[in-house]
Structure formats: C-alpha cells, structure tokens
Image: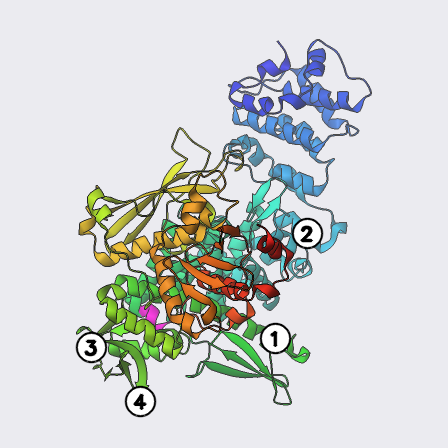
C-alpha cells in the first residue's frame, strides 16, 4: 500500500479534488524506495510525499517512526525546494486535516508547511492562511492554535516595508477597505500614537465590548485616531463587494475584526456625526449583496449588530430617527428585532409610542421654515435647499452659480455641507416610504400632531402638504396654512379647520367613489402638484369574479416571466421577504419558493419558480422566474383564507406590489430577453392593460390635451397612437413597446428622454418611469422625419 492509502478517509476529498495535479506516478516510485533527482518537479513531489508519511490514519496519534521524522526534517531544512502556491496550500490542508483527526505532534505536522510558506510572498501567505470556510479542516485544527507564534512570524512583514507593511501585518489585504487602510491611511494608523489603538481594535472578538476594553480605548484614543476612524467607517458605509482571488468578498475577517473595534469605540466618542455614521454602517452591512435586503442575506451581521448595539446604548432622541431609518431598510429578523428593541427603549424613556417617537425625531438639518439653510463658507454663501434637495452657491459678486467655487472646495465647512446634503437625501427617501406606510396601515394622528410634526417640518413638510388627508366624517383635503393655523381645503375649494384633537389619516382612493377620485386627479393636474408617491393616482385592485371562483388564491399575476433579481429587489424594498430560488438544490425544492409579506394582520405568499437555463445561470441563482398564485391567510391562523374575507385595502395594496414587480421585471419589456418563452413577449408587450397601466392611461388622458403633440396623438384602449410624417405608431401603455402601421411591424427604440417630454409635468413617476418613457417616445415619433439615429431610421424605411 502506498502513502495515499493511509490518508484519513474522512478527508479524502482534499486529495480527490486535486487528483489531476497529484504526481501519483512519482508517489508510487517513492513508495517503492526511489528518491528524487535534481528536477524541480520531482523534489516538490518528494516533499509532499514525505509530508503525507505523517498520516497515522483516521484515529490519529503521535507515534511517528524515527525514519519518517528524519525525512520530514530533512525536507523542511532544504531551502532550495521551489514550492509553488498550490503546493503550499495543499501542504497546509494536509496538516490541518491530520491535526483534526487527533494527531498531537503539531510541531512535526506543520514543519514542512511552515518551511514552504516562508518561501512565498506575503500576499500569498495571507491567502493560504486566511479564514477557512466552515467545512474546512482548518476550522477544527488544534494545530493552528498551537502555532500562534509561528503564524505571527510568517505573516509579519519586515520593517523595511514601512507603515504599509505594519498595517498589512495586522489587517491583511483581503478587500478594498483593508488595502485602503494599508494605503492612504497607513501613515496615520502606523503612527506610534495610533498603532496601539489599531492593535486594540483587533481584539474585538467578543459579542460586546467589556468595560475593561472600553476603559483602555479611552486611554488610547487621540484626535487623529478619531479622524482616521471616521474616514474608514465612512468608507465602510458605502462599500460594495469586490472580486478577490478566492471569490466575491464584502469584508474579509481580518478586516472586519478591527472595524468592529472601531464601531465599539464610537460608544466613547461624543460628536454629532456618530449616530448618522453608525446608522449608515448598520444599513450597508445589514443588507444583502448588491444592496438587496432579503431576510436570508446579510453582508456582515456582526458589524451591523455592533453598530446597532452602540446606537442602542446612546439611547437619546437624536438616535431615534437613525434607528427608524435603519429599521425601514433592514429585513433580517434578528437585526430588525434589535433595531425595534432599541427604538422601544428610547420611546419608553420618553413616554411615547414607536411612531410618535419617530415623528418627533426627524432631523431638520438646520433648515429654516422655508426649507433653506444658508452658511458662509469663505467668500461664498452656500444654500442648502430641501427642495431637490440641492446645494446652491452665491459667489462674492452676489451671483447664484450651480457649482462650488474653486476657493471653497477644500474648506472643511463645505465638506460638512456636502455630507449633510447626502444625509438629507437619505432622510427624505426614508420619510417618503414611512408616509406611504402610514397610508397603507391607515395610521391615525391628531390634527395638532399633523401640523407640528408633519406640515410645519422643513424636511417632510413639502411632502405632507402635497398629500390628501381625511377626517372621520369623510371630508378630505390638502393642508393649507391660513391665519396662523392649518386648514384642509377640498378639491372643490371648501375648507375645514379641525380642532387640535381631531383624528386625521391619509386619504386612500379605495375609500372613495370613482367620481371623487377623478376630481382629485383633475385638481392635482390643474395645480401642477406632484405627490411624493401615488395617492390620487393610486391603483385600486378589487376582487374579481375569477378570484371569487378560485376562493383561496389569486391567479391575477400568475404566468409572468420576470427578471428574478429586479422583481426580488422591488419586492424587498416594499417589505417582502423569504424569496430565494436557484439551481442549487432541485431535490430540496431550491428551484421553487415564495415571497412573503405581512400587512394588517394578514400574510400573503406569492409563489415563484426558476424559469431560466441552469447553464446560463452557472447553476447558481436564477436569472428568470415564473410567477405563480398568490395566497392569503390570517397571520395567526394556519391555512389559506377565502379572498372574500381579506380586507379590501389589504388585498389591494398587496396585489399592487405584485403588479409593480411584474411591471418592472417582466421579460415582456424586451423581445430578446423573452425569447424562449413562447408567446409571452407578444401577450405581455401588447396585451390587456394591468391596473398600473390603466392608471397610466388615465393620467395620459388628462395630460394629452396639454401637450404640443396633442393634434398628432390619440388614446385607444391599450395604445397611445402617434402620427408621424413617415409612419403612424402605436405605443403600448403597459410595456412601452411600439408597433408601426399599417403592418404592425415592431419598432425597437432604447428608452430615452426627449427634451420636449422632459418639460412635461408628470403627476407621478413611481412606476419605474414608464410614463416618461412613453411620452419621450411619443415626442420623438411625432417628429419622425428629423430622427437621425441610424438604428431607428433603418427600421422606419424597412417594409
């Protein structure tokens, strides 16, 4: 029997997956008593063969024959063996496997691997000794623990490598954040005043910092340490996955460890930027790859947890708005629970409900009642405006300019204003989602609260004043300030001034007659008022006869083919979770799944299955999914419920989410993408309109008379028909696809925005921009004689 036959069977896969690279013929010669010649390949093979001789089988032990030990030491002492990266990685895997099997002579097991790794460059050493996956024997190897000093020796770069080498020895270089720490931050991190702090950050191995750990931070923390910490964590807050030699990586473990120490350190830093930065890190680390927020995925839960723990300890009203923004973005249950618990603690302390706490802590960013903040920076006045939001600049001569004058671009005050602008944009986006959620859950608040915390607020006031609010008696109107107080003014001009304690909620079209909804739509268009989300133009989904017949499920959005990633991202943004399908486990139903959402005590489940070629997807996550039925049940009751029992608003809002997901991700928007799904492009791209498309048609019916192409355009049941000089065109109101008369030839135009269309007031753009796409195509085709793009003109003249 040869040396390979004695290797532990439980780790045989290590040799099996390298079968093609193993020099088995040479091993057989050495088993028979042969020795290597002078060639490099033979000497390397002999070294690996000698290393394999240390195997004592599956049960391990420590009694190696003296001849084997002599041979192993001889190979380790030979400094001329030209070890390769793959050789060295195999040597370490063998040693880890034998150590995991109970071999106790660790010094002998790792003698040759240590000698081999010392011949490689430091980046290769770090790759080999990096964090091993859970199935790897290194995770269970007691030998690694026994070799701490030896491992530190081979990983510590020499002094001549300078500050970069010092930092790399501590944080390695497994991702862009680590490389930046060893690059532009290296001089400061390696400075004698900061280096002890970096070494202390690397000791953040527990779940939470101890008082002793924090006490030492207080003694080590310096002004430069705080500055470099802020810069590095700001990079983490916007960091994305990168392609590394061993695959896609967000943060390598040697990087994440000191970063957790930096987050813990924020507990002892009293500065206004801390809470916002912690929230940004929690969100970016707590969501999934490429920014998705599914419950099953998380970029780095440990860092997200650390950031949330520190936010919870800060526990003041200033952190409540940050925690609310974090909670709105995350989907992972453990992180959501932590953010909610932190908010609960702050709310209880303040004697408020969750929602009331968030209402009172939306940051104002120093904006005045008019939504503007002015600040002198050098010789320029910088204006931060909530409308946009945007920065505007008034130069020394009093002229308003769009870009920052050169004289202030390096001013720290200008950098702070730019950071504030980013925070303002994020806050406005989060508040729009929160307001829409208030509409969906029918949240009530008093008229006094609405005025003080919504209408008067400089950040969210413009949004809330563009929304329709409803009183208990059914009267609905827009908030208008009159005589120092707020009144509600209806579409017909009548006004009501509610008392301070009158309950008020956002108006939903499902509660109104079609005539009143039309009245509000006309009123908003006449005033040129764009709402922050669809309210007056919101789609309403009523139970259909077909759904009454199916009883417990809806097939309304069944049978669509969607781009899985796009549809999933939109659903997750709107609070759905649990959807994960791919080609990885057909026997375990990995190719089928469901997206789930809970609303108003009801849980909805939307089935999906993989509908793409596994070879095209590299046997990974699906690129295309086929949609299935939608089922409802009470959140606390097992089994599907009859659709007739689902509250109309709950049914409408959940079906609306499904319609939006299909509208954004459908393959029917792209003829080439839909190839292989027989007839789907034709049926979706030119078929009956969905509720979203019907709402789009209603908006166009109101807009069309106001357009300069009104005499060349008309609406039919499913199309916007545009007469050009060369052809007549029909633009589908659902997909934006175009047919040319008289022979219904398909016209492919890449979506763009025509200058004429760009100036048209649109009452909404929430549906993925399709309304603006349709108008852009209409303006372009109405003047088709002036089109110069050859990709379009070739199609116009073709028969």
- The first of marks 1 and 2 along the sequence is 2
Whole-Å distance between the Cαs marked 1 and 4? 39 Å
Q: Count neighbours of disc 3 (C-alpha within 10 A) and say few if under 14, some if 14 to 19, many if 20 or more.
A: some
The answer to whether mark 2 and mark 4 are in CB contact below 8 A is: no
The residue shown at (72%, 11%) is 29
The residue tagged 3 is 502
The residue tagged 2 is 166
Q: Nearer the viewer, residue 37 or 715?
A: 715
- The first of marks 2 and 3 along the sequence is 2
The residue tagged 1 is 412
- The first of marks 1 and 4 along the sequence is 1
Whole-Å distance between the Cαs marked 1 and 2? 30 Å
- The first of marks 2 and 4 along the sequence is 2
Q: Nearer the viewer, residue 213 or 288?
A: 288
The residue shown at (39%, 48%) is 295
Q: Which of pointers 1 and 3 indicates the residue nearer the eye? A: 3
- Magenta segment boundaries in residue numbering: 357-361
- Residue 554 on image: x %, y %: 27, 46
Whole-Å distance between the Cαs marked 2 and 3? 65 Å
The residue tagged 4 is 484
**In the displayed structure image, the side of residue 525 where residue 724 appears, left or right:** right
Displayed quadrant of residue 487: bottom left
- Mark drawn on residue 98: none
């Amino acid at each position: 029997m040869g040396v390979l036959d004695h290797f532990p069977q439980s780790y045989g896969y290590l040799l099996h997956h390298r079968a093609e690279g193993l020099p088995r013929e040479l091993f057989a010669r050495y088993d028979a008593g042969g020795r290597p010649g002078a060639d490099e390949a033979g000497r390397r093979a002999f070294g690996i063969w000698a290393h394999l001789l240390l195997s004592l089988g599956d049960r391990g032990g420590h009694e190696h024959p003296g001849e084997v030990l002599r041979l192993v030491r001889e190979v380790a002492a030979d400094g001329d063996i030209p070890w390769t990266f793959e050789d060295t990685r195999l040597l370490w895997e063998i040693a880890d496997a034998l150590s995991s099997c109970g071999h106790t002579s660790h010094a002998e097991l790792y003698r040759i691997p240590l000698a081999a790794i010392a011949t490689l460059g430091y980046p290769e050493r770090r790759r080999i000794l990096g964090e091993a996956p859970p199935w790897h024997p290194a995770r269970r190897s007691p030998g690694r623990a026994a070799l701490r000093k030896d491992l530190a020796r081979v990983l510590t770069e020499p002094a001549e490598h300078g500050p970069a080498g010092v930092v790399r020895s501590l944080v390695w270089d497994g991702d862009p954040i680590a490389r930046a720490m060893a690059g532009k931050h290296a001089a400061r991190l390696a400075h004698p005043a900061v280096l002890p702090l970096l070494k202390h950050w690397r000791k953040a191995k527990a779940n939470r910092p101890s008082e002793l750990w924090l006490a030492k931070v207080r003694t080590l923390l310096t002004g430069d340490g705080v500055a470099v910490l802020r810069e590095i964590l700001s990079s983490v807050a916007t960091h994305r996955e990168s392609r590394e030699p061993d695959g896609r990586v967000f943060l390598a473990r040697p990087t994440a460890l000191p970063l957790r120490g930096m987050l813990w350190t924020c507990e002892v830093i009293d500065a206004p930027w801390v809470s916002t930065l912690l929230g940004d890190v929690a969100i970016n680390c707590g969501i999934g790859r490429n920014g998705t927020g599914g419950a099953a995925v998380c970029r780095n839960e440990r860092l997200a947890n650390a950031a949330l723990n520190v936010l919870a300890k800060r526990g003041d009203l200033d952190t409540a708005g940050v925690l609310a923004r974090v909670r709105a973005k995350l989907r992972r249950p453990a992180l959501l629970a932590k953010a909610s618990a932190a908010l609960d603690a702050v709310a209880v302390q303040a004697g408020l409900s969750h929602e009331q706490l968030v209402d009172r802590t939306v940051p104002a960013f120093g904006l005045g009642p008019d939504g503007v903040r002015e600040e002198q920076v050098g010789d320029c006045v910088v204006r931060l405006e909530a409308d946009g939001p945007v920065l505007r600049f008034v130069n020394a001569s009093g002229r308003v300019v769009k870009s920052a004058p050169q004289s202030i671009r390096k001013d720290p005050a200008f950098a702070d204003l730019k950071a504030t602008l980013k925070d303002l944009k994020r806050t406005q986006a989060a508040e729009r989602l929160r307001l829409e959620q208030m509409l969906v859950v029918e949240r009530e608040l008093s008229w006094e609260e609405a005025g003080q915390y919504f209408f008067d607020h400089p950040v969210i006031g413009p949004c809330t004043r563009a929304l329709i609010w409803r009183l208990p008696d059914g009267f609905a109107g827009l908030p208008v300030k009159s005589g120092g107080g707020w009144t509600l003014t209806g579409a017909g001009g009548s006004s009501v001034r509610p008392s301070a304690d009158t309950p008020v909620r956002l108006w939903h079209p499902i509660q109104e007659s079609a005539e009143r909804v039309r009245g509000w739509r006309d009123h908003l268009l006449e005033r040129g008022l764009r709402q922050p989300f669809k309210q007056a133009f919101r789609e309403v989904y009523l139970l259909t006869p077909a759904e009454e017949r199916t009883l417990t499920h809806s097939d309304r959005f069944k049978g669509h083919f969607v781009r899985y990633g796009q549809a999933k991202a939109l659903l997750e943004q709107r609070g759905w979770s649990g959807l994960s399908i791919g080609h990885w486990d057909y026997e375990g139903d990995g190719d089928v799944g469901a997206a789930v959402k809970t609303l108003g005590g009801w849980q909805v489940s939307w089935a999906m299955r993989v509908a793409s070629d596994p070879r095209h997807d590299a046997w990974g996550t699906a690129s295309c999914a086929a949609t299935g039925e939608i089922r409802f049940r009470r959140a606390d009751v097992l089994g599907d419920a009859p659709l007739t029992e689902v509250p109309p608003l709950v049914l409408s809002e959940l079906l609306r989410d499904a319609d939006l997901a299909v509208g954004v991700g459908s393959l029917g928007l792209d003829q080439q993408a839909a190839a292989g799904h027989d007839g789907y492009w034709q049926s979706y791209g030119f078929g009956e309109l969905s509720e979203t498309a019907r709402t789009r048609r209603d908006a166009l019916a109101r807009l069309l008379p106001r357009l300069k192409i009104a005499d060349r355009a008309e609406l039919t049941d499913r199309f916007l028909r545009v007469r050009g000089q060369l052809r007549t065109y029909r633009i589908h109101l659902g997909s934006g696809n175009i047919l040319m008369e008289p022979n219904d030839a398909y016209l492919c135009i890449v979506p763009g925005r025509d200058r004429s269309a760009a100036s048209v007031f649109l009452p909404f753009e929430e549906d993925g921009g399709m309304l603006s796409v349709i108008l852009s195509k209409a303006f372009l085709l109405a003047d088709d004689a002036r089109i110069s793009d050859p990709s379009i003109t070739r199609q116009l003249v073709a028969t």
